[in-house]
Amino acid sequence: MDPYLTAKWVHILSSTILFGTGLGTALHLWLTHLSRDVAAIAVATRNTVRADWAFTLPSVIVQPMSGAVLIELAGYDWGEGWLVLALLLYGIAGICWLVVLKLQLRMRNFASEARAAGTALPEEYFRCARAWFWLGWPAFTAVIVIFWLMVNRPEL
Ligand code: HEM
């Protein structure tokens, strides 16, 4: 198999896992959150955290690694504008994701404690959920722009 095409296949496959898992779990968690059903929220937050460890984290690592292989094999210059911008956006999305990950862990803990105690979700849970919601926008926008940069590779 051609090494370049193999690396590109891995890179594209990883990008679909990164974007698809993020979007799917975010939609599911947000809709469950809107239901205000504490037991459902406890399960959804727990499963979102699991999906992040199992799918998002590996693809977050594979993405730049396979990208680096593509750069070397194709002979791109690391200083090319589209690549620099993509790396910058990737960094921004990565920071948002790390904060989101921490918020999800807290949301999961608040929800499972409330479910065990049979109480309502605390105000702190709702603060985390709001921050989680708003951080998703820059992260997903950054990834959508990266997709565009990767496909078009504009001269910047
Ligand atoms: C993190 C650092 C990244 C680096 C260094 C990188 C690098 C590259 C390179 C060198 C190519 C090959 C372009 C060509 O075929 O000539 C490529 C293609 C591609 N990348 Fe990335 N990439 C990165 C992140 C991402 C991310 C985050 C996504 C989307 C989530 C993405 C999606 C794609 C796609 C879909 C292609 C195929 C484009 C095409 O063949 O037209 N990449 N990438």
Image (spheres, rainbow, N blue to C red):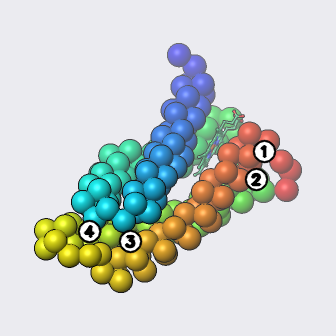
* Residue furthest to the right: 155
Calculate the distance from the C-alpha at mark 1 to the C-alpha at mark 3.
34 Å
Comparing labels 2 and 3, the label whose residue is closer to the camera: 3
Rendered residue at 13%/73% (across/down): 117
N-terminal of the pair, mark 2 or mark 1, is 2
- Pointer 2 with pointer 1, Cβ within 8 A: yes
Residue situated in front as seen by the camera: 107 or 100: 107
Q: Which mark is residue 82?
A: 2
Please tell me whether residue 136 is drawn above or below residue 152 in the rendered image: below
Mark sitting on residue 103: 3
Q: CA distance from mark 3 to mark 4?
A: 12 Å
* SS at mark 1 in the image: loop
Choose between 109 and 119: the one closer to the eye.
119
When the figure is inspected, residue 123 is found, relative to residue 114, above or below; the finding is below
Q: Which of the two discs, 4 and 1, labels the residue nearer the N terminus?
A: 4
How packed is label 2: few (under 14 Cα within 10 Å), some, or many (20 or more)? some
Q: Which amino acid does the dot numbered 4 rest on? A: Ala
Tell me the number on the disc at residue 111. Answer: 4
Q: Nearer the viewer, residue 136 or 35?
A: 35
Closest to the camera, between mark 2 and mark 4, is 4
Which labelled disc corresponds to residue 153? 1
Quarter of the image with the C terminus in it: bottom right
SS label for mark 4: helix
Image height of 146 relative to 94, above or below: above
The first of marks 3 and 4 along the sequence is 3
- Asked if the residue at tag 3 contacts the one at tag 1, i.e. Cβ–Cβ closer than 8 Å, the answer is no
